[in-house]
Each structure stands twice: as structure tokens, then as C-alpha cells.
Image (cartoon, helix red, strand yellow):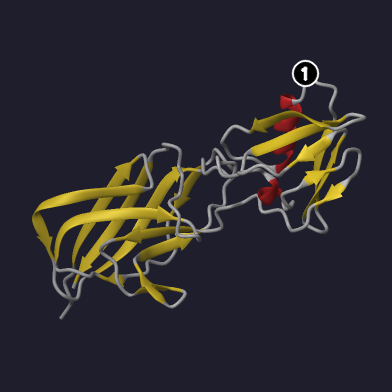
Amino acid sequence: MSTIFIMYTITLTGNSSELSCDFFPPLETSKNSKICLLGFQTNNSIPNITEKCNKIGFVYKTDKDLTLLDVYSLPIGSYELSDIEATIKRILSDSKVSFELKANNNTLKCEMLCSIFVDLTMPNNIGSLLGFKSKLYDANVKHVSDTLVNITETNCIYIESNLVMGSFNNGKQCHTIHEFYPNVPPGYKIVEVPRHLVFYPLNTTSITRASIILKNQNNELIDLRGEPVSVRLLIQDL
């Protein structure tokens, strides 16, 4: 005798990393019901230059003292290393300052050369992203970053649902229904469809609210900068 399954799909849409909808009357399911992710769509507009790491300063050295040229803020956005260099060069285009920022593909470190002093001592400076310590860097010297370039802050996107149980992260119970790394360049469409559906037990038999939260590996909300998001869930009622 064949088993009959009752299935429900829930689609959540919006423009943020937190989505939710309410059910009235509640959606009633059996105690053996399970849930999985069917699909996730958005645009890859996740910034790696944010207000936490977008400052850089430049300093002239005169005979008597150091004179601050200015502290600049890079616009928030998604950058490759070459984009950061090009943006800083545009910022300095009205001056006679030369600036270079290159990646060493062998060491995975960053090399910086500037005709004046580079100041990375201010709060929220770009140094941590490039692997440089917070200090003043001499002019006309090629500086190699102290650590590897960390230009991609989001290493993983965790999709969490309030309806999920049976998921663990580093030994602690969580609500993750799916995790993945966006494998498209900035500005391109992210379409995540699991190749194999992974079902998790539902933590309730009476669903009054369904919510989705998008976080990174540091348990921080993903900044999608207002891009449209669509998430589709499947509930299998056994």
C-alpha cells in the first residue's frame, strides 16, 4: 500500500536579510513533518567595503613635521583588489600623489607603494581587509601586508528558519536549514537550488509564523543593500 504525503510550500519575499509571514488560521501538521529549502534567489550585492573598514589617510612629510593630507572614505560596495586601487587613485587624482596596490598571487598577500606616507591608524581603516596592521607606512617603500588579504568577509551564507530543529553549528543547536557560498561575482544573480533536498524535523505542529534570517559565518546579518530576496520552503507532512 503506497504512502500518501501531504506537502506545503511557503514562499517568503522581501528586501532584507530577515523575512517572515504569519498564518491565520495556523497551518496544522503532524508530529513527523519535515521541512527543507527548495530555493533561494537574490543578487550578489554583499559589500566587503563597509563603514567598519573603509578609511585610509595620507600624510606629507615636511622638514619639520608630518602633515596630514586627508582621511578618505571609500564608498560602501563590493570590490576586488584592483577596484580598491582604482578608487583610491581617483580620490588622489587632483594631487601629485602616486599610489599602487597589488596582489601577490604566490603569497596571497598585498603589496602597497605610495609616494607619501599612508596612515592606517584611524578607526575603521581598510588595513584589516588588506592584511596591514594599524600604523603609519613610509613613503616610497613597497610594503607587504602582515597577513593574507581578507577581501571576502562573507565566507558562507547561513539560511536560518524558526521552524527548523536538528541542525548544529560547532556543537551548538541552531536553526540552519541550508548553507552555501555565493559563487557568482558581485552584481550577478544568486540562484541557490539544493542538488539534494535535506529535510529537518519541524519544531511545531501548529505553524503560526514562518521566518527566515540570513547570516554569515560570524553570526552577523547579511547586508543585501535592499536587493530583492526570495526563499521557498517545502514542508512534507508524513
Q: Residue furthest bottom?
A: 1
Question: Which x, y percent locates residue 119?
Answer: 75, 40
Q: Residue furthest front?
A: 64
Quadrant where the N terminus is found in the figure:
bottom left
The residue lying toward the viewer, choosing from 46 and 202, is 46
Q: Residue at (56%, 44%) from the top-left corner? A: 52
Q: Residue at (67%, 51%) from the top-left corner? A: 128
Which of the 4 image quadrants contains residue 50? top right
Mark 1 residue element: loop
The relative height of residue 5 versus residue 226 in the rendered view (above or below) is: below
Q: Which residue is mark 1?
A: 94
Question: Which x, y percent locates residue 22?
Answer: 17, 50
Q: Residue at (47%, 74%) from the top-left corner? A: 170
Question: Which x, y percent locates residue 218?
Answer: 50, 60
The relative height of residue 169 versus residue 52 in the rendered view (above or below) is: below
Quadrant where the C terminus is found in the figure:
bottom left
What is the number of callouts on the image? 1
Identify which amino acid the numbered label 1 is placed on: Asp
The residue lying toward the viewer, choosing from 46 and 91, is 91
Q: Residue at (13%, 52%) from the top-left corner? A: 23
**129 to the left or right of 69:** left
**78 to the left or right of 192:** right
Q: Residue furthest top?
A: 94
